[in-house]
Image (tube, helix red, strand yellow):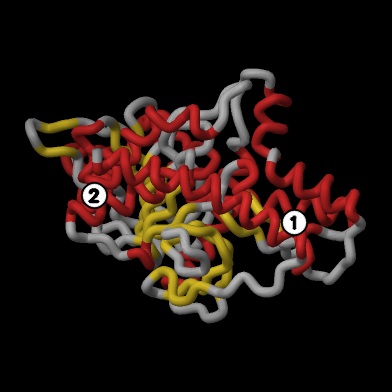
Amino acid sequence: MESNSGANDRIARIAGHLRPQVQGDVCLRRSHCRAKGGAPGFHVAILGAAGGIGQPLAMLMKMNPLVSVLHLYDVVNTPGVTADISHMDSGAVVQGFLGQQQLEDALIGMDLVIIPAGVPRKPGMTRDDLFNINAGIVKTLCEAIAKCCPKAIVNLISNPVNSTVPIAAEVFKRAGTYDPKKLLGVTMLDVVRANTFVAEVLGVDPRDVDVPVVGGHAGITILPLLSQVKPPFSFTPKEIEYLSDRIQNGGTEVVEAKAGAGSATLSMAYAAVKFADACLHALRGDAGIIQCAYVASQVTELPFFASKVRLGRGGVEEILPLGPLNDSEREGLEKAKKELSASIEKGISFIRK
């Protein structure tokens, strides 16, 4: 019969991942996390896991069978989110990390780091209005990534993505760990919206639609290539105008509909998990994984650009060409590049100043 002290030790070890705490100068380590029940798979960290995007994102990643260890980090409320999600009977072992002092422990040994951290948009705000706050947050998080898991693939969600990806690149360059193939800005929500809105017009299942969305992740930098939609369809000029405007302003549509109660958190979490799942399948060695992402690119003269990429074990293995554009798309591309160039420079200057 097991002694009381042995049972108490076992219970304390199992529960340790629910209540992050600092023991002297040493943070709660993964060895304290529940050892049994974890399935083979990848180690994933979510930075900003207690936020509006982070919580549903954490829940959906807990459901992913490719995830064996899930680290949840935030500066507030991580214990509660961790306790809640850890009750789900899926294979991933969940551990929470609270506050700056536990950031590095949250990152050690991670294969994939997803960053939704930052303040959300409010009515009347643009993504650039978020810059001053979120730029500093991304800088701090990427400095820790460079130190603790420099080989991890990074999925960056924090807005404005057009600027935060260049910020992350500059941080990694300074640390000597920059691998452009492993830094990906998540623009999947633009693709998800495009597929959904086009499917509504066509009267088909959105899962059967594929719309390439290139450029960036804000306003006119979001360029849906409706001429390349699958299944092929010839839209009228009025339909193109309607769809382009709605895809570009989908975030504003949600912010206004929520009337101050939040931004596009649920659909963003869905899109982020869809993209993360593609990255995990690529890490596993699956072939033919192609998604749109905002990455270091030579598709245009700009240093960063969103387009279709082929993912593999090393991250971005190939950046695909834009393909044929019609006249309106070429015009939209020039407008997108002008605004995107300023956003990129703003991010780079934030680190170099």
Identify which amino acid the numbered label 2 is placed on: Arg
Q: Residue at x 27, y 61 (%)?
A: 178
Which residue is depicted at the point 60% across and 30% down? Answer: 263
Total count of labels:
2
Q: Which residue is mark 1?
A: 195
Does 125 appear above or below 274?
above
Pointer 2 residue: 30
Place of residue 335 in the rendered image (x, y in percent of width and height, measured from the top left): 63, 50
| Element assignment for label 2 | helix
Q: Nearer the viewer, residue 244 or 69?
A: 244
**The one of 101 and 71 positioned closer to us in this rendering:** 101
Mark 2: few, some, or many residues within 10 Å (few <14, many ≥20)? some
Residue 225 appears in which quarter of the rendering?
bottom right
x and y, in percent, of residue 271 in the image: 60, 51
Sort mark 1 into few (<14), some (14-19) or many (20+) by Cα contacts within 10 Å: many
Residue 131 image position (x, y, % from top left): 43, 32
Q: Nearer the viewer, residue 66 or 90?
A: 66
Q: Earlier in the sequence, mark 1 or mark 2?
A: 2
On the image, the x and y values in percent for residue 107 come to 27, 49
Can residue 325 be seen here? The reply is: yes
Q: Nearer the viewer, mark 1 or mark 2?
A: 1
Determine the residue positioned at 67% across, 63% down.
Answer: 212
